[in-house]
């Protein structure tokens, strides 16, 4: 029996064997956790004007709540993953959701902007761990041939966060106040943590077939990281300020913003499904095409986004591109990881959050110096740069090096 086969049949303590119905339940719990984290990270976007008014701060300053959150995830992902590499997944993931829940409650109680910023830091730390470990944990619940579907399962929770979580919380915050939206999210996060504690197997990240890349390739992995930073930065350069953009530039009513976010999230969900199918059939195309779609969408938003219907369509296309990219790139990371997949995923998560952190900052600079409409043009430029980077995946040797190298 090979080493990989031995890992594949290793016993699971306090949890399900790969591919069982309990494994499906554990995957559902991970998807629900992803919903919580994505909703929490993006929640200031939908309620940016209300939060800014509460703390008497500008839109660009309040947008930094997204930037700082993402910066913490970037800085903490690899170190925290390394420090906790031997902690059983059940303990690690359940603890991350508990910290998220209590940190979100602290944000709801924030009397000042500084308090709110500190609470965002607290909730960003468990997110750094979650996105480093969860995709690998999901892949370990099933056989190696189901890696892509398991990853898509986790990221379906991201789609639910975008499609349901952010719009629903935006609506709730508009009706009952932004603090109520944070309290409800905290409760959902704590309940999800309890589900994870019940369903996730007690195993270390290194104890499964998903611990290492199936086709290690350091060059392709680095291209994936660079393209991810640029594409995500392009998306968030505009998306952070999309509520203000839609109401002030596109003429959409304030209470209709949630519907536009719903359309964007629905398109992102379709992108997740498309990303999984495309990567299985044409992996390079699946990795290159999303950036091109995002560039076209953001350029269209800048040039033609003064109309509400066009702005909604462009934002939906942008969301579709992002959803496609997420699944395709994360699956490729599990394929091309030059060392341990949890560390490679940590750096991918860090790259993703570099983009999230850079986007609001770049968008804020564009807004301040060139006006709100320029945020879409800046996003289009970044998405185009991501496309140029991803095109490099089409050249060079495909296959593993003589032996896997550490990241």
Image (cartoon, rainbow, N blue to C red):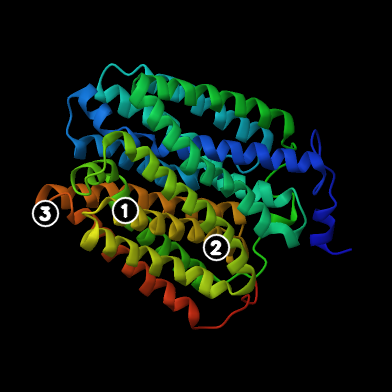
Disc with the residue nearer the chain's start (1 vs 2): 1
Image location (x, y in percent) of residue 202? 74, 36
In front: label 1 or label 3: 1
Crowding at dot 3, Cα within 10 Å, few <14 / some 14-19 / many 20+, comes out as few
Crowding at dot 2, Cα within 10 Å, few <14 / some 14-19 / many 20+, comes out as many
343 w.r.t. 96: above or below: below
Which residue is farthest right? 1
Disc with the residue nearer the chain's start (1 vs 3): 1
Left or right, 375 with reference to 139: left
What residue is shown with label 1?
Answer: 309
Residue at horizontal 48 percent and vertical 53 percent from the top = 268
Residue at horizontal 36 percent and vertical 74 percent from the top = 388
The quadrant in which the N terminus is found is bottom right
CA distance for labels 1 and 2:
29 Å
Disc with the residue nearer the chain's start (3 vs 2): 2
Local secondary structure at mark 3 = helix
What residue is shown with label 3?
Answer: 370
* Residue 333 in view here: no
CA distance for labels 1 and 3:
24 Å
* Residue 328, numbered circle: 2
Quarter where residue 262 is shown: top left
Image location (x, y in percent) of residue 264? 42, 50
Local secondary structure at mark 2 = helix
- Of residue 222 and residue 302, the one placed in the foreground of this image is 302
């Amino acid at each position: 029996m090979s080493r990989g086969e031995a890992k594949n049949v290793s016993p699971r303590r306090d949890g399900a064997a790969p591919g069982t119905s309990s494994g499906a339940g554990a995957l559902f719990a991970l998807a629900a956790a992803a919903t919580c984290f994505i909703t929490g990270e993006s929640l200031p976007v939908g309620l940016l004007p209300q939060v800014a008014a509460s703390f008497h701060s500008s839109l660009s300053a309040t947008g930094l709540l997204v930037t700082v959150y993402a910066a913490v995830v970037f800085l903490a992902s690899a170190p925290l993953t390394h420090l906790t590499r031997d902690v059983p997944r059940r303990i690690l993931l359940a603890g991350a959701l508990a910290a998220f829940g209590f940190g979100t409650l602290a944000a709801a109680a924030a009397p000042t902007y500084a308090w709110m910023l500190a609470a965002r830091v607290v909730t960003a730390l468990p997110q750094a761990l979650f996105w480093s470990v969860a995709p690998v944990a999901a892949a370990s619940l099933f056989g190696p041939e189901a890696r892509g579907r398991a990853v898509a399962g986790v990221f379906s929770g991201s789609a639910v966060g975008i499609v349901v979580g952010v719009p629903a919380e935006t609506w709730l915050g508009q009706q009952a106040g932004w603090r109520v939206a944070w309290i409800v999210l905290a409760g959902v996060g704590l309940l999800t943590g309890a589900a994870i504690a019940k369903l996730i197997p007690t195993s270390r990240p290194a104890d499964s077939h998903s611990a290492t890349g199936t086709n290690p390739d350091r060059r392709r992995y680095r291209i994936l990281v660079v393209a991810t930073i640029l594409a995500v930065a392009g998306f968030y350069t505009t998306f952070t300020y999309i509520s203000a953009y839609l109401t002030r530039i596109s003429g959409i009513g304030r209470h209709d913003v949630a519907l536009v976010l719903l359309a964007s999230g629905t398109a992102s969900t379709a992108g997740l499904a498309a990303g999984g199918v495309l990567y299985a059939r044409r992996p390079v195309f699946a990795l290159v095409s999303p950036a091109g779609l995002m560039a076209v969408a953001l350029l269209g938003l800048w040039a033609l986004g003064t109309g509400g219907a066009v702005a909604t369509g462009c934002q939906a296309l942008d969301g579709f591109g992002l959803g496609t990219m997420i699944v395709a790139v994360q699956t490729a990371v599990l394929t091309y990881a030059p060392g341990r997949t949890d560390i490679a995923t940590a750096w991918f998560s860090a790259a993703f959050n570099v983009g999230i952190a850079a986007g609001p900052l770049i968008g804020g600079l564009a807004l301040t110096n060139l006006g709100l409409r320029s945020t879409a043009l800046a996003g289009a430029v970044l998405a185009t740069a991501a496309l140029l980077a991803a095109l490099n995946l089409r050249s060079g040797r495909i296959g593993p090096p003589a032996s896997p190298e550490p990241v």
